[in-house]
């Protein structure tokens, strides 16, 4: 479903018509409800509505990032009977809250028609409420309601089969090749608990090329399942290549299951030995609820009672969960089960990989493992990757105490088995790292950072960063346009523009900084960084380059002021090692105690031509 009712009263009729005939996909058996809407890559609403030169209000007050919104174009046949025409403007992206709970394709189309008829009524209610209470957010009630519907439906995906693919059918009416980036990321703002910025949450990104005319792109479910099955809310975005503003017609943008299905692979049949280790999932298995999303998570008594019973029989336990390691361990300790768990594998890798790691640590065969999870997808993933492991749905917990393979032993040696393994685990616990190699992942992205002295050609982009940036706005300041010129003319400040790219493509200009220098200190007076590179340690690479090889510098400080919305900036500084300054003027890093090396980002710094050149640039 598309946000089709936001073009405005003066919208022209759709100008695009297909230049050639094409056949759209017809063999869709089921699909998931998605509400695709108009969004901004650099969104910082509502404060950006007052400070951003690019702000153009829609009828509901949000920012217009498509030329005429999303327009219904009936000249393009599709399964829905029309194409959704989008003329992207700068920073525009098509985005939806993720949902993979499938319903029959016919039922989905009926639901979309019903919601389309209901939306204008909800719009009128929101407009009236906005005028009465004086809160403009009521004008967005339709958008919020449909996004919430998608979010509420997604947990139902656990009860059924997963989609086969994300199906994208797109018509490019232009004469040149266009590029879209398909992005799936965890919606951090929807989480009830803040996460370490270095936590490697699951994400997916793929570059697709759109030649002139019709093209079909099937992205197989297994490629992005780590995101959709992690148990956290997620967003899906379609973003044009940096600095391009294409016009595209979207015929399908859906998680789908096709009519024709491959025959299932036969399961391995074998006589299995008694179970020696039970591996538990956590969310909605060990406890009720999702740890990173729900406030009221509480233990499942059936799970904890079974654990105590099996522990007395000498059966071992561990965890394979897609979760935040520290928060999950803390919760297990709170409910009294942490002491049972041996070599827990908590991160965002496939659960089959976690079970393999546990087997290696315990040095017991995989055919003596049982895995318990509430999610059919996870059970199927483990069953396919490790057919010798017994997979059990969490709904069958109460039957397991009597399972012949779970009778164990009542000898004193059996009851001490867990203690012996705990002792071994304790010896290596201090050396334990997350399963996910975050910096290895960043290194694989082939990130490149270009640091450029400010020039007039960057004026408009610098204005955008100074006016819109919220989360990675270190000083917390916003600059009206009339103040920007004098600041850029200040001769005693270094002014640096940051460009970033990776193996997926260019991110364009992502940052701007004002820097001053004292005898032994580099002072970052202001620093704005796009959320497009959030969590990639671009800040550290920039700081490292500022300091360079100048041995006279023993401190770098940042003018940081908390605003409530720039917590991510504070988290980044703390992670790097910055501490609050006693003078109360920001945060600082003592370079005599901590290095800033950032070898996973390739940095290119142009020769400085400013009055006070960067130490590192001076030697280039």
Image (cartoon, rainbow, N blue to C red):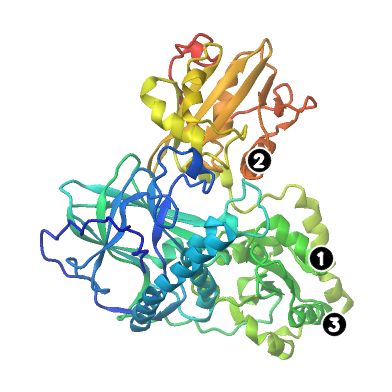
Please tell me which of labels 2 and 3 falls first in the chain: 3
Secondary structure of residue under mark 1? helix
Res 343 visible: no
| Residue 357, picture quadrant | bottom right
Task: Answer with left or right where residue 127 lies relative to residue 108.
Answer: right
Q: Nearer the viewer, mark 2 or mark 3?
A: 2
Q: Residue 334, labelled with which disc?
A: 1
Q: Nearer the viewer, mark 2 or mark 1?
A: 2
Circle 3 residue? 410
Residue occupying image coordinates x 39% and y 53%: 58
Circle 2 residue? 563
Residue 195 or residue 226, whichever sits in front: 195
Res 270 visible: yes
Residue 415 or residue 112, whichever sits in front: 112
Residue 13 picture location, percent across and down: 20, 59
Residue 350 picture location, percent across and down: 54, 63
Task: Answer with left or right where residue 338 lies relative to residue 455.
Answer: right
Residue occupying image coordinates x 55% and y 16%: 493
Distance of label 2 from label 1 (alpha carbons): 33 Å
Please tell me which of labels 2 and 1 falls first in the chain: 1
Secondary structure of residue under mark 3? loop
Please tell me which of labels 3 and 1 falls first in the chain: 1
| Residue 472, picture quadrant | top right
Task: Answer with left or right where residue 365 lies relative to residue 412.
Answer: left
């Amino acid at each position: 479903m598309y946000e089709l009712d936001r073009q405005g009263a003066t919208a022209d009729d759709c100008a695009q018509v297909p230049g050639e005939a094409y056949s759209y996909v017809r063999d869709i058996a089921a699909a998931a409800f998605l509400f695709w809407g108009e969004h901004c890559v650099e969104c910082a609403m509502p404060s950006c509505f007052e400070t951003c030169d690019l702000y153009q209000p829609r009828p509901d007050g949000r920012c217009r990032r498509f030329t005429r919104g999303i327009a219904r174009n009936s000249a393009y046949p599709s399964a829905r009977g029309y194409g959704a025409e989008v003329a992207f403007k700068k920073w525009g992206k098509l985005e939806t809250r993720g949902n993979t709970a499938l319903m029959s394709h016919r039922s989905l189309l009926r639901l979309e028609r019903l919601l389309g008829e209901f939306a204008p009524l909800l719009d009128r209610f929101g407009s009236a409420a906005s005028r009465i209470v004086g809160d403009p957010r009521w004008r967005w009630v339709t958008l919020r309601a449909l996004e919430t519907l998608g979010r509420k439906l997604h947990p139902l995906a656990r009860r059924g089969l997963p989609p086969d693919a994300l199906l994208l059918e797109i018509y490019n009416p232009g004469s040149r090749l266009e590029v879209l980036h398909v992005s799936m990321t965890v919606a951090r703002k929807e989480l009830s608990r803040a996460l370490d910025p270095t936590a490697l949450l699951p994400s997916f990104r793929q570059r697709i090329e759109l030649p002139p005319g019709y093209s079909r792109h099937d992205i197989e479910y297994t490629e992005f399942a780590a995101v959709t099955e992690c148990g956290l809310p997620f967003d899906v975005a379609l973003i044009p290549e940096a600095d391009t503003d294409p016009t595209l017609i979207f015929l399908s943008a859906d998680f789908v299951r096709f009519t024709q299905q491959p025959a299932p692979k036969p399961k391995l049949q074998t006589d299995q030995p008694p179970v020696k280790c039970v591996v538990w999932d956590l969310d909605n298995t060990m406890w009720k609820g999702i740890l990173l999303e729900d406030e009221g998570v509480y233990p499942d008594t059936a799970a904890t009672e079974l654990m105590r019973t099996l522990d007395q029989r000498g059966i071992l336990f561990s965890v394979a969960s897609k979760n935040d390691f520290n928060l999950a361990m803390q919760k297990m300790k709170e409910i009294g089960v942490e002491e049972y768990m041996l070599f827990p594998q908590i991160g965002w890798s496939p659960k089959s990989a976690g079970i393999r790691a546990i087997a290696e640590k315990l040095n017991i065969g995989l055919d003596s493992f049982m895995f318990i999870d509430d999610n059919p997808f996870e059970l199927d993933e483990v069953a396919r990757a490790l057919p010798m492991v017994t997979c059990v749905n969490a709904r069958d917990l109460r039957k397991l105490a009597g399972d012949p393979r779970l009778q164990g032993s009542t000898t004193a040696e059996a009851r001490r088995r867990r203690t012996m393994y705990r002792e071994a685990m304790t010896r290596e616990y201090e050396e334990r790292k997350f399963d996910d190699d975050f910096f290895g992942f960043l290194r694989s992205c082939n990130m490149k950072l270009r640091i450029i002295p400010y020039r007039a050609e960057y004026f408009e982009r610098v204005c955008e960063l100074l006016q819109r940036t919220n989360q990675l706005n270190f000083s917390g300041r916003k600059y009206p346009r009339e103040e920007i010129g004098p600041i850029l003319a200040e001769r005693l400040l270094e002014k640096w523009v940051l460009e970033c790219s990776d193996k997926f493509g260019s991110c364009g200009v992502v940052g701007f900084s004002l820097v001053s220098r004292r005898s032994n200190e580099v002072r970052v007076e202001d620093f704005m960084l796009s959320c497009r590179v959030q969590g990639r340690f671009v800040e550290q690479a920039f700081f490292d380059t500022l300091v360079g090889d100048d041995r006279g510098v023993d401190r770098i400080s940042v003018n940081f002021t908390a605003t409530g919305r720039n917590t991510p900036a504070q988290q980044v500084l703390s992670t790097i090692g910055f501490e609050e300054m006693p003078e109360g003027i920001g945060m600082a890093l003592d370079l005599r105690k901590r290095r800033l090396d950032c070898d996973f980002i390739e940095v290119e710094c142009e020769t400085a031509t400013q009055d006070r050149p960067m130490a590192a640039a001076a030697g280039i």
